[in-house]
Amino acid sequence: MLKITGSEDYYPTPETLWEQITAGLKWEEVEYVLEPSAGRGNICDYVKQEKERIRDNWREYAGEGIDCIEIEPEFRAILKEKGYRVVHDNFLTLHTYKHYDLIIMNPPFSQGARHMLKAIEVQQTSGGGIICILNAETLRNPYSNERKELHQKLEQYGAEIKYYENAFIDAERPTDVEIACVKVIIPEPERKTTIFDSLREKGYEEYETERENSELAESDLVSAFVAQYNREIEWGYLWTEYLRLGALTWKTVD
């Protein structure tokens, strides 16, 4: 049996607190969830419970709808044993194009601002919601550039913030620290790509050049073949870049 110690910042969230925080959330509209500081899976268990409450056949198992990130190897083992999909070991180094309807998190209190900024960065890719528990001091005392940046971002997106006293006083690991619950929706960005414009522009320019030099091209068949080959290589590269826009770029952690 694994001996769980956890870090000094590890404070499992009481289920009763999540019930308060997520009251009114339309779970039927939440399909893909990311828990970036998953610990032993308390939040994941709560999400799974809520999803199954409204839809019995919500995915065949939790790993299909919930992605987890956890830095502690012992906790990752527990998450996998529960059937959750662990996609990375450090949220702050995550790079992904995957869309998450909701990021729900209780990050380390000492790194709350950094983790919340990362969550905003992830959701800026395709839009989505964030529910995050922070040490109230993170928001009440914006003494660092990081906290100031977070304050600006939360104002920019019209975040909803509610403070709770003694929310962890009866928790598995008690603390009397005041917390803040932050709820924010990051809008889906406007989709814009110049790839097809580049393809059209390149094709037109090359057509004009070939037309003007048609006599030379006809007299030098080898050069014509080489030019055609290079053009196909360049177009293939642009098409590959286009396909990469939709790629999922997470890694599974052992």
Image (tube, rainbow, N blue to C red):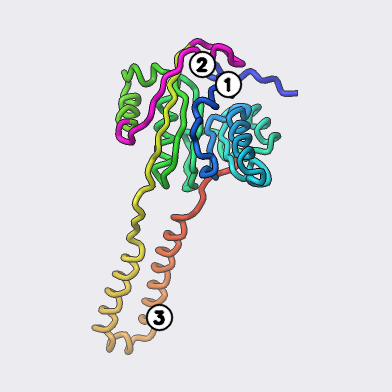
Disc 1 to disc 3, how far (Cα)?
A: 69 Å
Quadrant assignment for the C terminus: top right
Please check the rendered image and state whether residue 164 is part of the magenta-colored stretch, yes or no: yes
Determine contact: label 2, label 1, CB under 8 Å. yes
Residue at horizontal 59%, vertical 15%?
Answer: 171
The region drawn magenta spans 155-176
Hey, which quadrant is residue 14 in on the image? top right
Along the viewing direction, whichever of 59 and 27 lies nearer the viewer = 27
- Determine the main secondary structure of the stretch shown in magenta: loop
Which kind of residue does numbered mark 3 sit on?
Phe
Q: Earlier in the sequence, mark 1 or mark 3?
A: 1
Q: Residues within 10 Å of mark 3 (few under 14, many from 20)?
A: few
Q: Which mark, residue 167?
A: 2
Q: Position of residue 137 (x, y in %)?
A: 39, 16
* Residue behind mark 3: 225
Q: Position of residue 158 (x, y in %)?
A: 33, 33
Along the viewing direction, whichever of 58 and 106 lies nearer the viewer = 58
* Residue behind mark 1: 14
Which kind of residue does numbered mark 1 sit on?
Pro
